Amino acid sequence: LHMRKMMSRSISTSCSSSATTKSMLPSSTKAVLPMPSTSTCTPFTPRARTRLIVFDKDGTLTNPLPMYARYTERFVENIMKNMKSRAESAADQVGGVEQVVGGGSEETDVDLASRCFSVLGYNTTKREFTEESVVVRGTGDQVFKALGGVGIGKDISKPAQPELELTEETVQTYNGIDIVSLFAKLVHEKNVKVAVCTSDHRGDTEKTLQYMLAGSTSKTNLVSMLSCSDDPDLRAEVEDENGNIKVKQSYFAKPHPQAILKLCDGLDIPAEQTIMVGDSVGDMVAGLRAGCQKNVFVRCGGFSEAKMWKRVQEQMEKDKVEMDSWKQKIVVAEDIGSILEHIVLES
């Protein structure tokens, strides 16, 4: 386990380092985390040449919705099996437990399944997700937290979370974009490094990239570095209201800037020469907090552009950042196909 972390750096666009402390943020302030103090990159040069582009994965590089639909259906199936099994094993000891966990009548089971799909933001008839579905926008831990409201609490063991069905057929891009050609142009023609910052786990991310870059003879050189939600350096030990220390997985994942700054530090490229590309509010907020040169919001992921501006503004107001200093750093595109237009080629 890592040392508990509390970063003292204030929100700014500087890349300089500052001291860390041992104190902890109260849980109520976690939404407005200060900038971490791990960056050792070189000082900012106005309009410096773009040297790194950080891409979000799902909703940006890939269209995961067909794959997520099957994943969600299998997940709820597992939940029902898990709860019914627990109900049957406990029926002889605790009266009425079937009704508590949804393992009784068919009507109760259907109702529980419906509530599970509802909190996951999934329409089983249309096989579509809501705009802010936790399956699409959140992490695995956030999915379990959402399901806690329908009876999957601490007293009930988590059902087996199904693996994503990652194959060459299910790993799809938007609008037929050739990711290999795009990355090759960035890396070999524009001398810009490519990295991926995702809320997904590293294993699934690496497998996705293998399929996505299957047509590349130099695929190992196209993506320089990954930042994934289950990376050990994105964990933290956090003190709760009762003074207990708990490990928080993904604590420094997006929208915290550390998820991006670890890439900048690892590649020795300052955030001010980095472009963040994503389809969510978390992507934009993380890029702004990290001090990225530009943040490209892509509409292909399905999140409303109007909601994006509204939510980012709300977060920047909480972070006490003036609108003029952040709004000009966000641009909107249909998909990543136009990313070459946003690169700064000369200082």
Image (cartoon, rainbow, N blue to C red):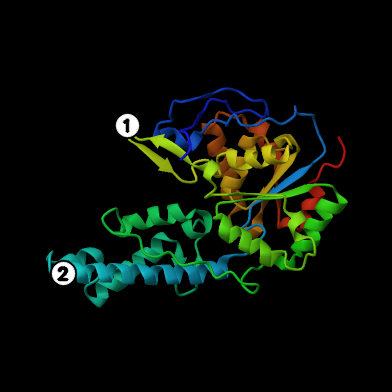
Identify residue type, mark 1: Gly
The residue lying at 63 percent from left, 63 percent from top is: 208
Does residue 320 appear left or right of residue 215 in this picture? left
Q: State yes or no: discs 2 and 1 in contact (Cβ < 8 Å).
A: no
Q: Which residue is disc 1 drawn over?
A: 243
Q: Earlier in the sequence, mark 2 or mark 1?
A: 2
Q: How far apart in space, not on screen, are marks 2 and 1 (Cα)?
A: 37 Å
Q: Which residue is disc 2 drawn over?
A: 91
Q: Quadrant of the N terminus?
A: top left
Question: Is 43 rendered above or below residue 54?
Answer: above
**Going by the picture, which residue comes out furthest to the top?**
19
**In the image shown, does 200 or 10 lie closer to the viewer?**
200
Q: Quadrant of residue 94?
A: bottom left
The residue lying at 75 percent from left, 65 percent from top is: 177
Identify residue type, mark 2: Ala
Question: Is 40 rendered above or below residue 132?
Answer: above
Please tell me how crowded label 1 is: few (under 14), some (14-19), or many (20+) other residues with Cα within 10 Å. few
Does residue 74 appear left or right of residue 290 in this picture? left
Does residue 290 appear left or right of residue 145 in this picture? right
* Residue 49 percent coordinates (x, y): 82, 38
